[in-house]
Image (spheres, rainbow, N blue to C red):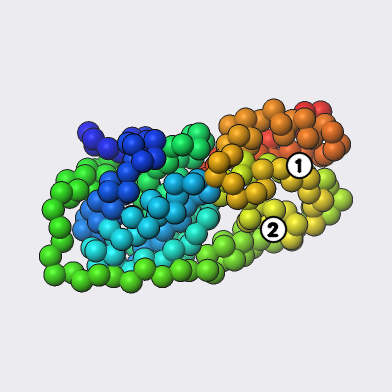
Amino acid sequence: MPKYFGTDGVRGVAGEELTCELAFRLGRAAGRAFRPRRVLLARDTRVSGPALEAACAAGLAEAGCRVALAGVLPSPAVSHLVRGAGFQLGCVISASHNPPQDNGIKFYDPQGLKLSPEEEERVEALLEGRPEGTGLGPVEPWPEAEDRYLGFLLRAVEGLSLAGLKIALDCAHGATARVAPRVFQELGAALSLMGGELDGTRINATGAAAIEPLQALVRAEGADLGIAFDGDGDRAMFVAPDG
């Protein structure tokens, strides 16, 4: 069984169990294991995210990969964009619904699926040692990632109108804080928003991991529906009008 990988990637307290050194080695090992030409790398809003992102990107680059930095983006967006935009590997820096001091690294294959246990073992087997003769790959911003994902979501519900509905939306100060409000506004809903700041010190203080504030907001605003995401946007909870 893998030593570092758990049920959803590698997780731990940032700077203690999940260090920049380990993030670098994981990125380099994944690059060596799968030899992807292009890798999409995104993160949630945690304070440790930029440092771990930079370390993981450096490891991938040392393995010769071309790394596209999507910035703050939900995990499902990476799953979609990997298979839809010509990437051979995806990587998300996030600990999902865990508290702010934690972080994690998970990889997606070319079909946008999480790695199998066998694939995770391939990565772990290459954590030691350096690649030979690959040269450093480029690391570049990919600012169109959010708009491409937004377009996909809107096409998926083409013809749907939420005009006349009031929705209370809790983005948990996490990865959905930019894209989720845009989706519902484009569909015509009136929004009452909480957890909408990109504030990694408060990630998951509300949202799917702590639903009570949204229940109170739904009742206070007379909303037709409440929707709460977790920190990386891969789970949601719904609140009825009575809370």
| Nearer-N-terminus badge (2/1) | 1
Tell me which residue sits at (36%, 68%) in the image: 139
Q: Of 95 and 154, which appears nearest the observer?
A: 95
- Residue 122 appearing in the image: no
Q: Is residue 212 above or below residue 223?
A: above
| Residue type, label 1 | Ala
**What amino acid is at disc 2?**
Arg
Neighbour tally class for label 1: few under 14, some 14-19, many 20 plus, Cα within 10 Å: many
Q: Position of residue 187 (x, y in %)?
A: 75, 57
Q: Residues within 10 Å of mark 2 (few under 14, many from 20)?
A: some
Reading the image, the residue beneath label 2 is 182
Q: Residue at x 72, y 34 (%)?
A: 214
Where residue 26 sits: x, y (%)? Answer: 27, 50
Q: Is residue 208 left or right of residue 37?
A: right
Question: Where 35 sits versus 238, above or below?
Answer: below
Mark 2–mark 1 Cα distance, whole angstroms, equals 14 Å
> Mark 2 falls on what kind of element?
helix
Q: Is residue 168 above or below residue 27?
A: above
Where residue 130 appears, as percent x and y from the top left, is: 15, 58
Left or right placement of residue 18 versus residue 212 in this view? left
Mark 1 element type: strand
Image quadrant holding the C terminus, namely: top right
- Left or right: 20, with 230 as reference point: left
Question: Which residue was labeled with disc 1?
Answer: 168
